[in-house]
Image (tube, rainbow, N blue to C red):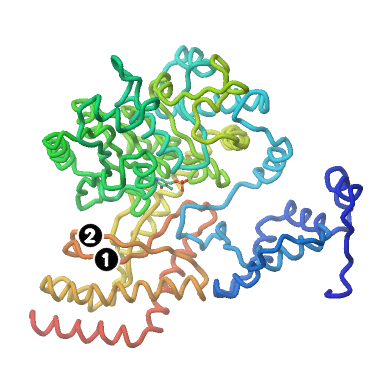
Amino acid sequence: MGSEQKTVDVNFDSLLRIFTVPEGPDSTLTKIEDGLSKNLNQFLREHIVAEEKPLRDIEKDFSNPIIPEQPEFVSDHTQHLLDTLVAQSVHTSAPSFIGHMTSALPYFLMPLSKIMIALNQNLVKIETSKAFTPLERQVLGMLHRLIYSQDDAFYSHWMHSAGHSLGAFCSGGTIANITALWVARNNALKAEGNFKGVEKEGLFKAMKHYGYEGLAILVSERGHYSLKKAADTLGIGQESLVSVKTDDNNRLCPTDLKAKFAHLKQQNIKAFAVIGVAGTTETGSIDPLTDIAEICQQEACHFHVDAAWGGATLMSNNHRHMLAGIELADSVTIDAHKQLYIPMGAGMVLFKNPDAMSSIEHHAQYILRKGSKDLGTHTLEGSRSGMAMLVYASMHIISRPGYELLIDQSIEKAQYFANLIDQQDDFQLISKPELCLLTYRYTPKETIAALKVATKAQASQINDLLNGLTKFIQKRQRETGKSFVSRTRLNPGEMHHQNTIVFRVVLANPLTTYDILESVLAEQREIAKQAPKLMNQINLLTEEICQTNN
Ligand SMILES: *Cc1c(COP(=O)(O)O)cnc(C)c1O
């Protein structure tokens, strides 16, 4: 390469070519495209290099702030992307990548997303999306029905109604949660008498009108960090997101929720929304939704369920009972890019009441006219892609029973893995899987025994060391191992509520086998040996505990 590299001139004719002429059959791009379509998994395995390169080194490839003056050939540039970008990206669909909520994608989505990108519809308004608008409304209707099971008349009446909306399609769970809380806030501070509503007059005047000293949103300690962003952007401040205690199973405590309501009322603070989490990001736990719904009913408070991750469980008739009470929610967040196996950028929020979103309705003169069916009147985002097409296609191609199989196999796999961990004498299961997410850690056999007789102070000391070990194993496994699990910090009751670092595993990838799970544990056990100093400290402390307490 270097000086031999062919160059392209900047001229209008060659620019026109990139809009009109496909790459030739022998071009690098065409070869890559062929490889991709023939066997995507093989392509990814071949092009993503497994060895860990420090981020610092990768940054060197991406440090030039100058926009090139010299155009490159598509083929040359594609090769450049393969070498610098693809090679150093993360193989999230690998069967041994079990640390996050991104799983393998069905093949059919690749060519379909090409169609979607080629059409480049803008869902903000009918004029740039036409059939995509009713399609998206149908997708929202499907998810609405999955949650709320209204009758046919309901959907034929509301699904395509111009002034109404069953929900909003958006880029992900964060925007979905913000949208739900935006609606809740505006409905709690709506127009009344001379007051024109918070959306017109703002928070300051709304508080004066209603005579509140503050506003609050209630969620369990295990709530997702997106809710903090929501509290911030909605102008109530992160500190107005009030944490409700959880029980030993990481589920919200209804008695503490009631206590928090009472406490806020004493201070004349209006709690305008409670969030139940249906599948927490860290442990997969599901809050007692029916109990929360009842409390919200008594308090006349918006009940939102954050089912970004767990909502897909509703597809399984065998397991949907775990989310009982979700149908009582005023709004529900579901991410299609998690357990519905859609590529990133597909979130949804559904509202039980088709009128609910009118409190955030926005109109403009040139688009989003009153009475139009433009989706943009009810979305936080403006221009949006036709992602809903991929959800629509998956619903048809995979179908409800297909999703049921996917969900069921994930849950079974998590139960298998939990049992496997329980059978080891040197691993501790920290949170049992409710769905397909579980947490655990490696603890030497003698140390597990010692923890049973340790005083609180001793347990705390050993816990600190184990936290270091868990961190070490997780990092080393990610950098040099064959598999990837993530880690998080919990405060389990059995560990005296001390900070406990754990491995976190999400088993949504249908390609993950039982063998892989066994080798994950074997690998972690081996990696532990690579931290002799830490292991030594743990062993010494373990002996000490056994001697002093026996
Ligand atoms: C993933 C997740 C979110 C955020 O969704 P994004 O799509 O990442 O914006 C919110 N809540 C829960 C419970 C989640 O699991």
- Who comes first in sequence, dot 2 or dot 1? 2
Along the horizontal axis of the image, is 333 left or right of 211?
A: right
Dot 2 surroundings within 10 Å: few (below 14), some, or many (20 or more)? some
Kind of residue at disc 2: Pro
Q: Which residue is mark 1?
A: 500
Alpha-carbon distance for marks 2 and 1? 7 Å
Number of the label disc, if any, that sits on residue 240:
none
The quarter of the image holding the C terminus is bottom left
Label 2 close to label 1 by CB (< 8 Å): yes
Work out which quarter of the rendered image holds the N terminus and state it: bottom right
Q: Is residue 229 above or below residue 91?
A: above
Work out whether residue 487 or residue 415 is closer to the camera in this orientation and state it.
487
State the residue at coordinates (24%, 65%): 499
Seen in the picture, residue 369 relative to 347 is either above or below; the reply is above
Q: Which residue is pictured at 54% across the width and 60% down the height?
A: 95
Q: Position of residue 441 (x, y in %)?
A: 32, 68
The location of residue 397, given as percent across then percent down, is 61, 35
Mark 1 secondary-structure assignment: strand
Q: Residues within 10 Å of mark 1 (few under 14, many from 20)?
A: many
Judge from the rendering whether residue 298 lies leftward or rightward of residue 468; answer left or right. Answer: left
Q: Amino acid at mark 1?
A: Thr
Disc 2: which residue: 492
In this picture, is 4 found above or below 174? below
Element carrying mark 2: loop
Tell which of 282 and 8 is nearer to you.
8
